[in-house]
Structures are given as structure tokens and as C-alpha cells.
Amino acid sequence: MPEGDTVWQAARRLHLALAGRTLVRSDLRVPTLATTDLSGRTVLDVTPRGKHLLMRIEGGLTLHSHLRMDGAWKVYSAGDRWRGGPGHQIRAVLDAGDRTAVGYRLPVLELLRTTDEQRVVGHLGPDLLGPDWDQDEALRRLLDDPGRPFGSALLDQRNLAGIGNVFMAELCFLARVTPWTPAGDVPSPERVVAAAQRLLEANRERLDRTTTSTAVRARSAHRLYVYGRAGRPCLVCGAAVRGAAETHGRIGRERPTYWCPRCQSGPGPA
């Protein structure tokens, strides 16, 4: 599931493959860009911003994409078979000769002026993996509405950018509170913010996302405490991990939410 760490990895792969190279072919398969041709232009850099990807291109252009739940960018060498999904799921092809970037299932793909990037990322809070990271500002935003469920506040990219469903569940477990605990009731919220930045920093170089301690992995090999483990024993106390569908205030966009009823205190789902 794309979150700040995997988006950072995708940006690095794209940057290493395309930055400084001239596109020999482009194929943007969304209606608004169907006639757009970027061939002959040089890719300048690829930068992550929270869960957004900004590909800057010669001529003052930025190709903006967002992966949401299952979007992906794949990079292939010349002659490789494309394996990211069936052809009808391809939304972008950027060919630089010996390297080709292919975007699959991209729910957001748009071309804008680089000077207009703030239009699509200006609402974001401090980026957990970005040069603008500001722990105090992130904490201030996170607690701005003290009655809001903590899980929802963590997922709100206007508070701090980069946390998705996996890290939300794991951070609530580490904080020993349920995701429905009011943000103002979370003890030592500054430690949660620091842990969020630390976890994303640690995972941006890993292929297997990991939040568990070395001791837990030594005896169980599990890399996540509660996410995706509904009905299985908690790695700390042994109680059955619970799972529920939760919209986090966005009706129609339910996400699975996990917690340990013994290790984590606070209210449960409605």
C-alpha cells in the first residue's frame, strides 16, 4: 500500500532512471492528456511530496501523479517485459531510450506548470520525509482539533504528509491508544509525531515495511504489530487483534483499521 516511504522509493527509482535524460516517446493515457506529447523534453528531477509525485520536465512543466491505494510506477530496461499489470491499466509511458517508466492504475495524473505546483500540494502539512519537516508545526496541526479521533487526524495529510493506513494503525499501537481516541487525550503526542518521522525514515530504504522491535522479530519474524492481523494473537500480549472498517470521516471510502483491545485503551468503532 503506497505511503510516504514507498512513494519516496518510487520517486528515487524514477529520478535515477529518467533525470537528465530526454524522452524519446511519451504516452499519457488519460482523456485530458491524450494529445499531449512530451517527447524531446528532458526530465529534470522527480520529487516526492507526502504521497504525491512531482516529475519536473524541461519547459517549466510538472507531471503530477498520486498513487492512492494501488497505483504504481514501474521502471523497465530496454527489452524487459512489462509486468505491472494488464495493458488496460497503464496510464502513462515515458520512454527515455534505455529506460522506460510505466504508470499503472494512477487515479491522478495531470500536467501543470511547475510554478503552479502549490495548487496540488500546497494544502499538505509538513512532509515526514521532506526538507520542510517541522515536528512542532506537525504537532500543532495534529492537535488543532482535540476532539477528533487520533487515527483520522494522523491520516489527514493537512496535518502531516506521508502517513497512510498501515502507519496509522502501527503508530496508534505504539502509543497504546485506539484509533478512535480523541487526539487531545493521547498521552505524549509529541512522541508519536517523533516516532512517525523515525519509522518513515527507517522504512524508506527497506523493501519490507517494518515497525516491530528487533526482539519481536527475533521470536516471531513479524514486521507489523497489528495491521492486517485481525483475529491473530497480539505480538505483545497475546490477545486477538481486532479489525473494523472505518471511513475516518470520508463516507464511501472505508479502510480496514486494526487494534489490540488489551494493549490499546480508548473507545472502539461506532
Image (cartoon, grey):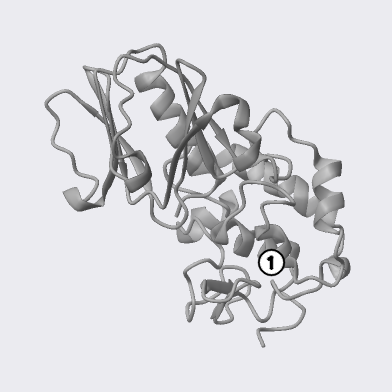
Left or right, residue 129 beside residue 51:
right
- Decide if residue 147 is on the left or right side of residue 230: right
Q: Identify the residue at the far bottom of this view.
A: 270
Q: Residues within 10 Å of mark 1 (few under 14, many from 20)?
A: many
Q: Percent x, y for residue 63?
A: 45, 32
Considering depth in this image, is 31 or 160 the residue closer to the camera?
Answer: 31
User: Taking 116 as reference, is 16 left or right?
Assistant: left
Quarter placement of the C terminus:
bottom right
| x and y percentages locating residue 64 in the rendered image | 48, 37
Q: Could you say where residue 126 lies in the image, as x and y percent from the top left?
A: 73, 40
**Count of marks overlaid on the render:** 1
Q: Secondary structure at mark 1?
A: helix
The residue where tag 1 is placed is 151
Q: Considering only vertical position in the picture, is 154 above or below 11?
A: below
Foreground pick, 190 / 245: 245
- Which residue corresponds to the image point at 35% horizontal and 21% vertical from the top-left? 17
Left or right, residue 110 beside residue 139: left
Which of the 4 quarters of the picture holds residue 153?
A: bottom right
Q: Does residue 149 sit above or below 160 in this rendering?
A: below
Quadrant where the image shows the N terminus: bottom left
- 110, 140: nearer the viewer: 110
Q: Residue at x 19, y 44 (%)?
A: 83
Q: Tell which of 187 and 262 is nearer to you.
A: 187
Residue 132 sits in which quadrant?
top right
Can residue 141 be spotted in the picture? yes
What residue is drawn where x is 73% and y is 45%? 125
**Amino acid type indicated by mark 1:** Gly
Residue at point 40% right, 11% down?
A: 20
Residue 205 against residue 156 in the figure, above or below: above
Residue 104 position (above or below residue 151):
above
**Residue 205 seen in the figure:** no
